[in-house]
Image (cartoon, rainbow, N blue to C red):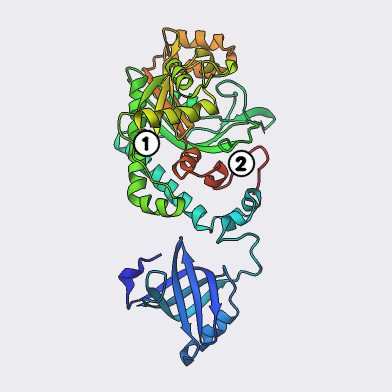
């Protein structure tokens, strides 16, 4: 919608939703909403020239769509920016025919699943509407950072002939009588691009996980930003790339939407300082035990769980005043076979933000013989032969990471669930609309 301050005393045409209608004895008011912005349309009933418009508004229902032509006038009594639109014509482009199934003004008036059933209405609420404006800027800025650093954008297949990575937690589909699977991630294919000679690649695309997890941060389909690049010396190069990427994204979001995010979501967008703090997993265990009396459960030793992640962020804020922290030196039993190892320690990390893991990144194993041995150790054989073949004919040292866009947005805006930050949520109990 137009910036009305630039249109004072000018004729403009605006299309949008009739959010509110007040039909008084001498005057009619419409609050016209478009892309989250609003303006008051004022019609004086006593003026003969307005007779046709008055009749139109008499029959108008809330959330109908209209196109209004008129002149913008200043009026200090109007709460919406001290301006109103005095119309010369109103055209109804569609009529809302019944009472809305959920409230647009108060998104919390209905249960989350009822809202998801009516997502096309739910998204008209400002809190929900702006999520995807903000998310768009976040992705745009990170994409621009990658373009500026000579990354090539690729688009990898989501239908694959072999179960990716571990062979578990994948969706099987019937592919013309044969078995196929929905890709968990583009991991193997972005490494294929490196083996093909592309030095830096990335992709923004859907990923699929057949996990029967009903938590606030899991989904069966989500959008991932995946990055891989070559000729690195260690996973520290990967860490630095991710730090700079996130700083670029958060800087752009703060500049464009920082005030709006504070107003609507009550969140201060913090652009993190470089470098982010780092800690080895065993040292982290000791710190969490010393500070908070926390003992990692035996089945999680060598890894992290949700409680560990929450306490890790608390530690990062207390010790470093930082929202982000990298954790390194995980157990090889808890990491994929394709992570490079040094002294039997995987050369990778998890990145924690606001109490949640947002990335598992690593330097990959690019040497064919070592990769084959590590795959056998994990019980993987011919099902990943196509992947191992990428490394038979030379492949440079490389590494990368992935970021779940929906989870990033949830954390950025301090929202309670991925159901809020996905355009249409997909989980074990939701496959519609």
Numbered disc in front, either 1 or 2: 1
- What is the quadrant of residue 110 in the picture? bottom right
91 versus 25 height, above or below: above
Residue underneath mark 2 = 426
Report if the CB atoms under discs 1 and 2 are less than 8 Å apart.
Answer: no
Name the residue: 58% across, 37% down. 219
Seen from the viewer's position, the closer of residues 98 and 202 is 98
The alpha-carbon separation of the residues under discs 1 and 2 comes to 26 Å
Q: In x, y percent, where is residue 407?
A: 50, 38
- Image vertical order of residue 288 relative to residue 103, above or below: above
**Crowding at label 1, few (<14), some or many (≥20) Cα neighbours within 10 Å?**
some
Q: Nearer the viewer, residue 375 or 64?
A: 64
> Which element is circle 2 on?
loop
Give x and y (percent) for residue 428.
Answer: 66, 37
- Pick the quarter of the image with the N terminus: bottom left
Which residue is at 62% across, 23% downward? 168
Quadrant in the rendering for residue 326: top left
* Label 1 vs 2, first from the N-terminus: 1
Badge 2: how crowded within 10 Å, few (<14), some, or many (20+)? some
Residue 135 % position (x, y)? 44, 46
Q: Position of residue 271 (x, y in %)?
A: 34, 40
282 with respect to 160 (left or right): left
Q: Residue at x 46, y 45 (%)?
A: 413
Q: Quadrant of residue 391?
A: top left
Please tell me which residue lies in front, 47 or 267: 267
Give the vertical position of 164 relative to 7 (above or below): above
Can the viewer see residue 363 in this picture? no
Query: 134 above or below 389?
Result: below
- Residue where numbered disc 1 is placed: 246
Front position in the image: 79 or 401: 79
């Amino acid at each position: 919608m137009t910036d009305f301050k630039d249109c004072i005393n000018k004729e403009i045409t605006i299309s949008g939703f009739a959010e509110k209608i007040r039909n008084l004895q001498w005057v009619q008011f419409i609050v016209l909403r478009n892309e989250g912005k609003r303006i008051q349309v004022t019609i004086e009933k006593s003026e003969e020239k307005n007779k046709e418009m008055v009749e139109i508004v008499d029959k108008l229902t809330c959330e109908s769509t209209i196109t209004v032509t008129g002149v913008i006038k200043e009026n200090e009594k109007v709460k919406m920016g001290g301006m109103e639109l005095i119309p010369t014509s109103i055209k109804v482009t569609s009529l809302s025919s019944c009472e809305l199934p959920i409230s647009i003004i108060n998104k919390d008036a209905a249960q989350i699943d009822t809202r998801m059933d009516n997502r096309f209405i739910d998204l008209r609420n400002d809190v929900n509407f702006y999520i995807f404006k903000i998310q768009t800027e976040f992705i745009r800025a990170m994409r621009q950072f990658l373009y500026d650093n000579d990354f090539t954008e690729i688009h990898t297949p989501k239908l694959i002939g072999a179960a990716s990575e571990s062979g578990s937690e994948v969706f099987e589909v019937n592919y013309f009588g044969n078995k196929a699977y929905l890709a968990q991630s583009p991991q193997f294919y972005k490494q294929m691009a490196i083996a093909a000679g592309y030095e830096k690649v990335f992709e923004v695309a859907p990923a699929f996980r057949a996990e029967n997890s009903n938590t606030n941060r899991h989904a069966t389909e989500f959008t991932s930003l995946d990055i891989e690049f070559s000729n690195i010396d260690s996973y520290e190069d990967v860490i630095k790339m991710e730090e700079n990427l996130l700083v670029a994204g958060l800087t752009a979001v703060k500049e464009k939407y920082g005030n709006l995010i504070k107003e609507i979501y009550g969140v201060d967008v913090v652009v993190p300082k470089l470098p982010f703090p780092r800690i080895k997993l065993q040292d982290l265990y000791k710190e969490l035990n010393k500070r908070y009396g926390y003992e990692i459960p035996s089945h999680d030793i060598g890894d992290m769980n949700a409680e560990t992640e929450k306490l890790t962020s608390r530690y990062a804020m207390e010790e470093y005043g930082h929202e982000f922290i990298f954790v390194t030196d995980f157990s090889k039993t808890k990491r994929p076979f394709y992570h490079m190892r040094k002294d039997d320690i995987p050369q990778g990390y998890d990145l924690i933000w606001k109490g949640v893991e947002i990335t598992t990144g690593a330097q990959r194993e690019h040497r064919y013989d070592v990769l084959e041995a590590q795959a056998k150790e994990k019980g993987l054989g011919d099902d990943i032969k196509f992947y191992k073949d990428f490394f038979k004919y030379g492949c440079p040292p490389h590494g990368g990471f992935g970021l779940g866009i929906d989870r990033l947005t949830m954390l950025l805006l301090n929202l309670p669930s991925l159901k809020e930050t996905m355009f249409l949520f997909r989980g074990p109990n939701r496959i519609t609309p």
